[in-house]
Amino acid sequence: MMRTLIKDSINRVGAEIVINGFVQTRRNLGKIIFLDIRDRSGLVQVVCAPSELGEDYDAVKEVRPEFVVEIKGMVNKRNEKNINSALATGTVEILAKGFKILAKAEPLPLDPADEKMGLDVYLDLLPLTLRTEKNRALFKIQAEIINAFRSFLISYDFVEFPCPKIVGASTEGGANVFKVDYFGQPAFLAQSPQFYKQIMVGVFERVFTIGNVYRAEEHATTRHINEYTSLDLEFGFIKDHLDVINLEIEFLRFLKGFLVERVSSELKFWNYQEMKIPKEVPIMKLREAQELIKKETGVDHTAEPDLEPGEEQWLGEYALRQYDSDFIFITHYPTAKRPMYTYPDEADQEFTKSFDLLFRGIEVTTGGQRINDYNQLVANIKKWGLQPENFKFYLEAFKYGMPPEGGLAIGLERLTARLLGIDNIKRATLFPRDLNRIDLQINH
Amino acid sequence: MMRTLIKDSINRVGAEIVINGFVQTRRNLGKIIFLDIRDRSGLVQVVCAPSELGEDYDAVKEVRPEFVVEIKGMVNKRNEKNINSALATGTVEILAKGFKILAKAEPLPLDPADEKMGLDVYLDLLPLTLRTEKNRALFKIQAEIINAFRSFLISYDFVEFPCPKIVGASTEGGANVFKVDYFGQPAFLAQSPQFYKQIMVGVFERVFTIGNVYRAEEHATTRHINEYTSLDLEFGFIKDHLDVINLEIEFLRFLKGFLVERVSSELKFWNYQEMKIPKEVPIMKLREAQELIKKETGVDHTAEPDLEPGEEQWLGEYALRQYDSDFIFITHYPTAKRPMYTYPDEADQEFTKSFDLLFRGIEVTTGGQRINDYNQLVANIKKWGLQPENFKFYLEAFKYGMPPEGGLAIGLERLTARLLGIDNIKRATLFPRDLNRIDLQINH
């Protein structure tokens, strides 16, 4: 008999079906054993009685949580008073007629759903702790964020490309890169697909790439991980950075609808608040933001090149209060503090047409317009104290004609965390790597 | 005025439009200059005359191939005798009324479309050579292969997950891994997402992941690269490896239709032959294949653990001749020569329920059923001379219950190459890394 998915059992009342799944819980009521069985589609209650199961009942007595089983049974309506409205299949239960263990499980070392579990214990046991309803919901939502990003961009003629991660020099010419032994030569793990996506604008005009990026930052915080997923896009024939900002706003609106359509039940497991995206999302220059903070709080950071975490949080609250917006774009970071490819504002060369996007007070995107003129880019590389010779491959894209262009990068795990009210980014990352941990293999 | 895409110009006859694009070619006819302009949607002929352009004509005189331009002009029907049927916009031309250079280009060092160009020259100049119609078609097709893989799997409840690539030990416990300096500790670049996708079967039942994988193989051949894109899937509740094989056949059928639907014009630039996928795709055990080769060719390799390239090619031709199939699955590789997680056939433990898929005589997929029983897996790890302690994290997935499961990995670049009749895999890889090359940065 073909397997029936658990969520479909409610449509098979009175029929005999076969389900496959994991034992979620087991409750003994005298000789009757109740099992909650979980598959990828949902959870259902199964009633196991010796009178119905005969010899198969011995297997039922053996099972514990996470045993993998195949059950043949009759789908019965529950009595009115036994209906479990918290469960999608709560109007039915399955009376087992046949029972087979497909795989055994050792006794669980803890309750995987224990909310008080420490982070280290949670991470040490990921192959088990990821199986809870709440975590399955979380990473299903994350998969749909990826899906939304891709679907949105494909509908606008963006072409996906697989981006190499082993590079011969670091993207930003800076520190914090992981070194790879490449057949005896030094190579590095890319900090971003920046150079490649710009090169690809010359090929396809509009491109995106989704992949791992690497930051060898030696701190362990709640908002940094050393390997994360970057949702990157880049496109040509823009007017300025505002075209990039507007595309991102449009994506966020699309994402909002996409999630409701595809994972509305998963969102309920988390502290999901629908994203507030007003008609006019606030866009503010860094210096304006700093002046505002000075005026409102008395703290004078108007000469600083970036915002501090507390200031980002303040601006997030301000955007919500003043504009009913979960988002605020901060533009015009100082030229001297941004990478050499960042486009300076013609009106004031000290500041760039770059931006960060704060989502509920935390940066989730960096983007902007890039320099597309070959000579200007070469001059900038020199001004940054770097050697144009080291960027020869990248520079070819500009030497042979590049339209005005820009793009952005969204940190997938940060976006997920902000969206679902998760404080520590490691909880929003499937297998987080940090200074102290690569799963159990580096683990102090 | 809003930009019009070049492909849409044929619908705007008699109207004034603005196009943006790259100069593909320039031809002077006395004072009249003809330009072919390329954007992401196509190519169109633009007629530039001093009488129409006035001062803007000076800019026209300056342009060379790969200049980026914005042109305002009138869309005119061509005379019957001037219609270019090879061009999608061949029934029209644009009479320029305004002309602006958006970005200049240096004189090209060569014709990027020169078919006789050597591989090293081609690779040194990728930011330019990728811009040809033929290469844009190629990597658009590759993007659609990724798109097909994902669309197909999502429709079957597979969940995508981002897989880490920095690992604390090599996946297969073998050699050929790149070493990373991880804050002073040794770490490695993953050879495959194998362990993670198996772990994720315990979470979502059906998963896929698309990402870079790494092989530190010290040879430079036409079928190997050191960083490539792996299309990986894994799923639970299978009967055996045949379920995995059947899913792949179904995917290939889907891909065939998907490509025709989405990139039929791009396929024409290459030696694309529609995939022959008969109703019954041949499936043969390794030993049967070797016996057949012995019988037909006299070469006795019936004790070898794998096929040689020449034998794969022979089997590809045999499949085409006998079954009208571009594909043949070879199963039952020897247990001793496959990774420790490979499922041994109950009927003959010396051989595994694993398979390779040959596409026109070259392996493009490896897959099979995996051991899902915890104790059997631990025993195998020991038998392979490895330490279970080193696989503790991976083993948790099995310790706490894992359904019978299997999966496969498709090499994206190899599949692309076979599909389009490309001999050297480096031509089917955007930015190939090999022993001697990381773009221009390691380049002997």
Image: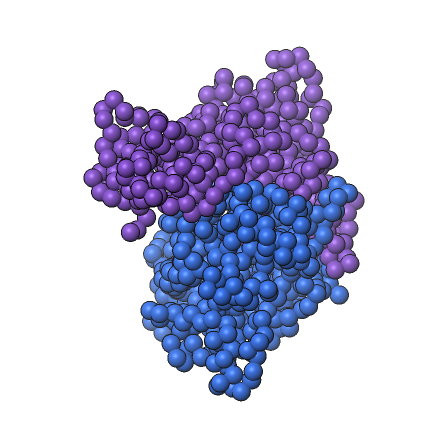
Chain colours: A blue, B purple
Asked if residue A32 can be seen in this view, the reply is: no
Which residue lies at the image location 60% right of the left edge and 31% below the top edge? B121
Above or below, comparing residue B172 to residue A426 in the picture: above
Residue closer to the observer: A419 or A441: A419
Is A416 placed above or below B140 here?
A: below
Residue A45, image x, y percentages: 45, 63
Question: With respect to residue B160, does B289 lie above or below?
Answer: above
Residue B214 in picture, x, y percent from top left: 65, 43
B110 left or right, relative to A238: right
Q: Which residue lies at the image location 40% right of the left edge and 71% below the top edge?
A: A282
- Towards the viewer: A106 or A318: A318
Residue B386 in sight here: yes
Position of B94 with respect to B345 (left or right) is left
Which residue is found at the position 43% from the left and 28% from the top? B269
Query: What residue lies at 54% left-to-right and 58% top-to-bottom?
Result: A342
Provide residue B42's location: percent of width, then percent of height.
37, 37
User: Which corner quadrant holds the C terminus of chain B?
Assistant: top right
Q: Could you say which is closer to the camera, residue A137 or residue A22?
A: A137
Q: Is residue B289 left or right of residue A262?
A: right
Is B221 situated above or below B231?
Answer: above
**Image quarter of residue A85:** bottom left
The total number of labels drawn is 0
Q: Residue furthest left?
A: B14
> In the rendering, at what x and y percent does residue A262 appear?
39, 59
